[in-house]
Each structure stands twice: as structure tokens, then as C-alpha cells.
Image (tube, rainbow, N blue to C red):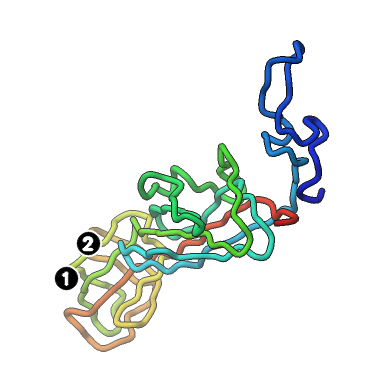
Amino acid sequence: MAAGKTCSACNGSGMVYGKDGQTPALCPLCDGSGAEFNPGREFTYELGPLAVNGQATLQAQSVQVLNRPFRWMMAVAVSTFPFTAQISDSRDQRPFSNQPVHSSNLWGTAQNPMPLLTPFRFNKNSNILGTVTDLGGGFGFAGVTNGSPTVTWVSGSLFVPGSSWVSAAITIGGVTYTVLSVGNQNTLTLSINYQGANNANIAYNVANTIRLGFKGVELDGE
């Protein structure tokens, strides 16, 4: 339905009255706007992929809303590791949370999206802004030997034992490998043998790749 069409319940006043004809209340159909509710067309904006170096923060990443207003209704995300995020609207820079929020407290999945209690309307041509911080990766320096899959921690972030780093990408000296297993905080094993020259102090990084999805509806009109 076209934006601006008069609400049939309140005739454009934004108010309805009780059975006594005296007690006013916001119109439940248009939420007090006076215009007929616009269901819009299903639409998704994605911010990313954002490659966040281990435990780093990316400030003010943005995705631009196209030439129609957008009503954000559900939050979804895909990431290598947990993260925090703080979202804001470029219109007034006001954030949607008092501080960066842990990914498990805001973002759902495509199969189980997190609904917003109050859907938010972004103006056309505005920007959805996001600051994200990795919580699961790492960076520092390690020791490697040509022809061996073993990587030994030297300094920086300790390795994360268990399954969280398994199958994650690890960049060693600018070359990307895949983690097969992490035996302890000081030793991990690559899925293939290290191909470079022996090095007792080479830079490594396990990054977090994050995609934030803003699911909702694209609206007609201004």
C-alpha cells in the first residue's frame, strides 16, 4: 500500500476513542501516524564480510540503505567466532545499545532470527553503522619449521585449545593455512605441513569473519 494513505481506523487523526466516545488512545492500526500501515516488501541488508584481525575492533563500518526507507525487524549474523557489536543510525549517530553487545545477546541465525521488540525505520540513502570487536581469534608470533605441521606459540595471544579454532584460517607470515587441532595454549597443528622457511618468531593471525544481516521490509514513499 502506498505510504501516506489515510488510516481507515482513525481517519488520519492517529487517535481512536473508547466505547464512551471520550477516552482517547493511539490508533492500534497505524500506531498514531494517521497513515495506513505499510507492510512493505521483504528485504535484507548485509554488513560484511568483515575480516576482523584477532581481538581487534573495526570502527564505524557501514552499509547504505537504498532509495527506499527500510524497516529493520530481525537481526541475524554469521561469524567464525563470537564478537561484540554496537549498531547505530547515521541520521543521528545514536546507538541501539548502551555498549557493545555480545553476539549471543543480539544476533540470531537465518533459521532462528532475533526479532526486534520495536522495529526501526531507517531513512532512504542513510547508513546502518556498526562497530565490531572479535572475541575469539588471536594474533602474535610463533615458531614454525619447514615440512612440519606444528606451530609453537612465542608471544601475543595464546592459542585456544578445544574445538573453536579447528578448521579456522590462520595466516602465518602472510600465507593462509587451516588449523587441524589445538593441543594446548602453546601448540597447534596445521592441516598441511608448513611450506615456508624455518622461523622461530613469525607473525600469525587467526581472524574472525563476520557478516551482519538486517532483515526487514523495504517501504514505499519517502
The image quarter in which residue 123 lies: bottom right
Q: Position of residue 156 (x, y in %)?
A: 19, 67
Q: Are marks 1 and 2 in contact (CB under 8 Å)?
A: no
The amino acid pointed to by label 1 is Val
Residue nearest the viewer, comparing 155 with 38: 38
**159 vs 31: above or below:** below
Residue 124 appears left or right of 81: right
**63 vs 197: above or below:** above
Q: Position of residue 44 (x, y in %)?
A: 64, 57
**195 vs 72: above or below:** below
Helix or strand or loop: what does disc 2 sit on? loop
Q: Residues within 10 Å of mark 1 (few under 14, many from 20)?
A: some
Q: Residues within 10 Å of mark 2 (few under 14, many from 20)?
A: some
Q: Which mark is residue 158?
A: 2
Q: Position of residue 180 (x, y in %)?
A: 38, 66
Alpha carbons under labels 1 and 2: distance apart: 9 Å
The image quarter in which residue 36 lies: top right
What residue appears at the point 34 percent right and 76 percent down from the top-left corner? 171
What residue appears at the point 50 percent right and 48 percent down from the top-left corner? 107
Q: Which residue is mark 1?
A: 154
Outermost top residue: 20
Residue 114 appears left or right of 17: left
Residue nearest the viewer, comparing 67 with 33: 33
